[in-house]
Amino acid sequence: MFSKLFLGTTEVNFYKLGNRFMKIFLIEIVIFISMIVLSISGYRDLNLSVDFTGGTTYQLSTNYTQDDISDVLNNTILKVSRYQTFENSNSILFRAVESTQERETELLNYLSNKFDVSKDDIEFQRVGPTFGAEITSKGLRALIIFLSIIVILISIRYEFKFAVIALIALFHDLFLSYTVYELLGLEITPSTIIALLTILGYSLYDTVILFDKLKDSQKLFKRNQLTTEVLNKTFNEVLMRSINTSLTSAFPIISILFIGNYLGIDGSLSDFAIPLLIGILSGTYSSIFVTVPFLSKIIKTN
C-alpha cells in the first residue's frame, strides 16, 4: 500500500467514495455552525490574547526557574495568559487579562514577593485591545481582496464553478482551524491571524494542482472519452503529491514547535507555527475529501 502511495499508483475509487466524503463534509458543516453558535451565545469563548481583550503587562529582571514561571501562570489572583523571555537577558514579561485595579495591584505585589524584586523595579503597563482590532481589520480586508482575486483568476484559467469549489475548500480550512482552536482552548494572538491568512495560500496550492491535473486530462482525452476511470487515475496521482507536500512542509513546522516549547524560546514561534501546522494538515485533507467529491459531481464523464 505504501509503495503504491509513494509511486502515485493507488487505486482509490474516489467516485464511489464521493457520497461518503460528501456526508462527512456535511457533518463537519453542522459541527462548524454549532461551534460558532456556542461561541456567539457565550457557552464557549475563544481564548483571545491580551492584544484583543486588553489587559496588563508586568516586566521584571530577575533570576527565575521554570517552576517560578509555572507558579505565576497558575496563580489564583489574576489570570496570566502568557509570558515572554528575552535572549541574552534575565528579563521576563508576563501578560495578564484585563481586570480591576485592585486585582492588578495584588498581582504586582505577588510578583514582587515571588521574585524578591521591588515593585518600583517592575514595569507595569496597561494594554488596550486596539492593536488586535487593527490586525483583525486589516486581515479581513486582505482576505476579501485575496478571495476576489482568486475567484477571478481561477474563473479565467479554468471555470467559475472551479472557483466556487476552491472557495469552499478555503472556508473549510478556516472553519476547521477555528474549531480546533475553540475545542482545545488555544490562545489566539495577532501571529495566529497572520498564520491563518498564510495557510490560505497553502490550501489553495493543493486545490490548484488538482485543477491543473484535471485540465491536462481533459486535453489528453476528448470530452466523450473522459471516463470515471481516467478521473480516478488523476485523483490518485494527485493524492501522493498532496501528502508529500504536506509532510515536507509539516516537518520544519514541528521542529519550530519543538524549539519553542522545549528550548524555552519565545512563545510567538508557537503562535505562528500551530495554526500553520493545522492549516497544512487541513489543506491536504480538504484537497482530497472536500475538493474531489465536489469535482466528481460537476465533471461529466461516460
Image (tube, rainbow, N blue to C red):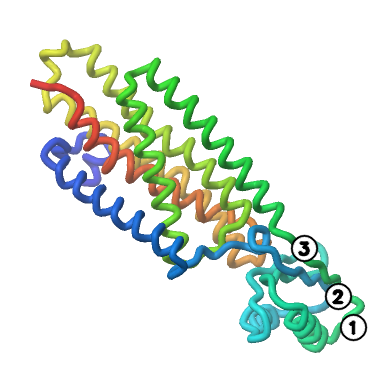
> Would you place residue 173 above or below residue 233 in this image?
below
Count of marks overlaid on the render? 3
Can the viewer see residue 60 in this picture?
Answer: yes
299 is higher (above) or lower (below) than 184: above
Q: Earlier in the sequence, mark 3 or mark 2?
A: 3
Q: Quote the CA–CA distance across marks 1 and 2.
A: 7 Å
**Mark before the other along the chain sequence, 1 or 3:** 3
Element assignment for label 1 = loop
Question: Gap in Å between the C-alphas at discs 3 and 2?
Answer: 16 Å
Q: Nearer the viewer, residue 97 or 154?
A: 97
Q: Secondary structure at mark 3?
A: loop
Asked which quadrant contains residue 109, the reply is bottom right
Q: Which residue is mark 1?
A: 118
Q: 13 or 36: which is nearer to us?
A: 36
**Could you tell me the amino acid type at mark 1?**
Ser
Residue 297 located left or right of residue 192: left
| Tag 2 residue | 122
Residue underneath mark 3? 86
Q: How far from the left and from the top, in percent, is residue 172?
A: 37, 45
The residue sitting at 56% across, 41% down in the picture is: 140
Residue farthest toward the front in the current orientation of the protein: 41
**How far, Cα to Cα, is label 1 from label 3?**
20 Å
Q: Is residue 105 left or right of residue 216?
A: right
- Residue 35 falls in image quadrant: bottom left
- Which x, y percent locates residue 226? 14, 18
Q: Position of residue 61 (x, y in %)?
A: 84, 73
Tell me, yes or no, whether the two marked residues, 1 and 2, touch with CB atoms within 8 Å.
Answer: yes
Q: Residues within 10 Å of mark 2 (few under 14, many from 20)?
A: some
Q: Can you tell which mark lies on residue 158?
A: none
Mark 1 vs mark 3, foreground winner is 1
Which residue is drawn at the image coordinates 75% and 63% (left, top)?
127
Residue type marked 3:
Phe
